[in-house]
Amino acid sequence: MKKSIRYIAAFLCAVLSFIFFIPSVYAADAPEVNGVRAFILYNVENDKVICSFNAGAELYPASTVKMMTAVVAYRALADRMDETVTVTREMLDGVNGYRIGLVAGEQVKIESLFYAMLLRGSNDSANVLAHIVSGSTAAFLEEMNSYARLIGMENTVYFNTGGMHVPQMVTTAEDTLKVAMAFAAEDKLLEMSSVTKYVFPASNKSNQFTVYNRNHIVSRYQETKYFYEYARGMNYGSTDEGGSVCCSVASRGGLTYICVALGGSEDATTGTDYALRTVSDLLKYGIEGFGYTDVINTEKPVCEIGVTLSATVDHVMLYPKSGLSVYLPSDIDVDKDITTSLRLSADTLAAPVEKGAVVGYLNVYYGDEQIGSVELITGDEVERNSFLYTLELIKEYSKSRFFRATAICAAVLTVVYVFASAAVRRSRARKNRRYRF
């Protein structure tokens, strides 16, 4: 069942990838962003890119590779997290960069390998997981690249499991968002990448030690200036060539935002890591800068429409059948920024009119984009006047084709009758004159 859910999530990611990156008219002015080569801020529930910069540019992925490693490995190992495995020399061949010091013959839990990779960026843990899943690094890389294609990552290629620099290994912020969504869809991965620290159990080759989360968006253990209280997990790391990279997710009030920053630099004076700074600021911007706004009030009449065949009223007011709440910038002025247009089914209504009858639609716009539509209904009941209705029937009947045909026939018959009558009278007159003589 769990695997079926994951496959469905992967399929949805692939389908949605075709519509993720349409520029949105909803985006308000974003905070000033400096020191990164690309970023993207995305709202999950409304499938909207809030703001982005250079999101399609090919850049080095650095540690974001570990998100794909985690997703592919977890899809295969979700039911084996408590299992203990033995590390082999082959699993560690070619591993460089940050390592927790796994050695051949060491027995470790699969779950511990995930924690070490996600919290501290352990490249040896990533490679061991790859071998557990696929038997070799090469075979696992094939799975990583295949899954990347499945979820629509058309500009990404992986050459290792940890993100150490390879000139040909590139990605984009757009693509990284897609793997971030696949990562966030796995509750366990998000949970593991959110904790401040993890105690790596003692093994047959090493003592117990503590692994701390280096993603300062969610952990304040070593640094506090990037921490954001509504953020959860994901990834942070850096390489000399790719700069720093960061990805995290934040949720509040039923809205969820994912932010990716690639190619971050560091301010030598202040020590600011701009990938962390960007993600922290943009997640806060999304959470605080957008929300659902009521743009249609069902108690307020929109317009009136004329009514015929009533002796008491000549119009009825139209109201929205339902309210409309739309995802918009929080500081929007509904009266100034929201416009509407009417589409009525008729110019007038003929009594009787039922209260709540649907007579058209109210289309709602923000800028040039339609953001919704609601039905328009009559606000009151209107009775029909029998005398006016009878006159209307006569009027309508007089306009009918049958009436015109009947009238023409009657006229023809009348003419025929007149001529026939005249002929009869003339015939009788001649007879009378004949008998008189």
Image (cartoon, rainbow, N blue to C red):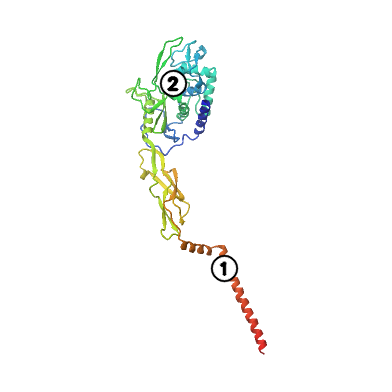
Rate crowding at label 1 as few (under 14), some (14 to 19) or many (20 or more) other CA atoms within 10 Å: few
Label whose residue precedes the other's in the sequence (1 or 2): 2
Rate crowding at label 2 as few (under 14), some (14 to 19) or many (20 or more) other CA atoms within 10 Å: many
383 versus 202 height, above or below: below
The kind of secondary structure element at disc 2 is helix
Of residues 378 and 47, the one drawn nearer to the viewer in this rendering: 378
Identify residue type, mark 1: Ala
Quadrant of residue 254 within the rendered picture: top left
Quadrant of residue 234 within the rendered picture: top left
Of residues 1 and 364, the one drawn nearer to the viewer in this rendering: 1
Residue 3: percent from the left, percent from the top? 52, 25
Using the image, tell me which numbered label, if any, was put on residue 118.
2
Q: CA distance from mark 1 to mark 2?
A: 91 Å
Residue farthest left in this picture: 269
Query: Does residue 431 appear to the left or right of 384 in the view shown?
Result: right
Of residues 173 and 383, the one drawn nearer to the viewer in this rendering: 383
Residue 93: percent from the left, percent from the top? 50, 14
Between marks 1 and 2 in the image, the one whose residue lies nearer the viewer: 1
Of residues 425 and 219, the one drawn nearer to the viewer in this rendering: 425
Residue 139: percent from the left, percent from the top? 55, 20
Residue 296: percent from the left, percent from the top? 40, 44
The kind of secondary structure element at disc 1 is helix
Using the image, tell me which numbered label, if any, was put on residue 65.
none
Using the image, tell me which numbered label, if any, was put on residue 407.
1
